[in-house]
Image: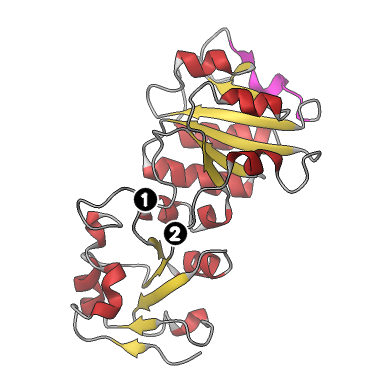
Amino acid sequence: MSAPVLVTDPQDPRVADFRNLKDGDRPVGTPRGTGPVIVEGVPAVQRLLASPYRVRAVFGVPGRVAALDLPEGMPAYEADKWVLSEVIGFRLTRGVVASADRRPPADVGDLLAGPDPAAPRRLAVLEALNDAENLGSIARSAVALGIHGLLLDPRCADPLYRRAVRVSMGHVLGLPFAVLPEWPAGLDRLHEAGYTTVALTPAADAVDLGGLDPVAHPRTAVLLGAEGPGLTREAQQAARVRARIPMRPGVDSLGVAAAAAIAFATLR
């Protein structure tokens, strides 16, 4: 790779993608989901390089950028930690950031079918999950535990928001996602594609999650609601199965990210 270009002026336009990241991924007043994808840390940037996202620039402290072994011609910049902090607006302990062009969400039909419409397939379906860190944690567990994609209702957080990407350790960049605009009526598209929809709820009248046989349900979609309120009654009614994670008495529920990981592993 070519040597990274040294940046000494925090106002250098070549690192504009990384300016004032504490305010979010995009300038104030611009629409959600329109800024570049921002990725932090060497492992996450390496996953970005292996993903289908086009890298715009890499920026970090001396040594961290060179350690990435970037392809020839990729815009790469380095600066001391003080200049780096002044550009991004906070102290970056991970030492390197990268920006990439966004990719549009996948087509819902393509996400449901997958490469082989006859093959077993599992999805995570998220309703009103508006916490970016929870979304990132769910994405990381999804990749680790064999979930093939995310299906989001229109109120969900942006899965490419900087905090979601950071908490996922960059794994969200390798996980296809689509938005289901009709909610929850659009769940019928999953049923038509052969999916068993499983709504997670702590309700006492729900079936035991461990009693569901993954072999008997080769195409499964796990529905998860926002931290606190959980899935709406309408979403639960639209699902084929309502299931609960058995817990000791006195514990009413788990955090959504923990519940998601348990469900993904149980239905693997």
Image quadrant where one finds the C terminus = top right
Q: Label 1, on which residue?
A: 33
Which of the numbered marks, if any, corresponds to residue 198?
Answer: none
The image shows residue 218 at horizontal and vertical percentages of: 77, 32
Can residue 147 be seen in this snapshot?
no
Pick the residue in front: 246 or 188: 188
Residue 207 within the segment the image draws in magenta: yes
Amino acid type, residue under disc 1 in the picture: Gly
Q: Secondary structure at mark 1?
A: loop
Q: Decide: marks 2, 1 in contact (CB < 8 A)?
A: yes
Q: Label 2, on which residue?
A: 102
- From the viewer's perspective, is residue 96 above or below residue 167? below
The image shows residue 148 at horizontal and vertical percentages of: 65, 45
Q: Secondary structure at mark 2?
A: loop
Cα distance in 3D space between marks 2 and 1: 8 Å
Of labels 2 and 1, earlier in sequence is 1
What residue is drawn where x is 48% and y is 14%?
234
Q: Quadrant of residue 89?
A: bottom left
From which residue to which does the magenta span run? 206-214
The image shows residue 106 at horizontal and vertical percentages of: 56, 47
Amino acid type, residue under disc 2 in the picture: Arg
Residue 112 within the segment the image draws in magenta: no
Can residue 257 be seen in this snapshot?
yes
What residue is drawn where x is 18% and y is 78%?
11
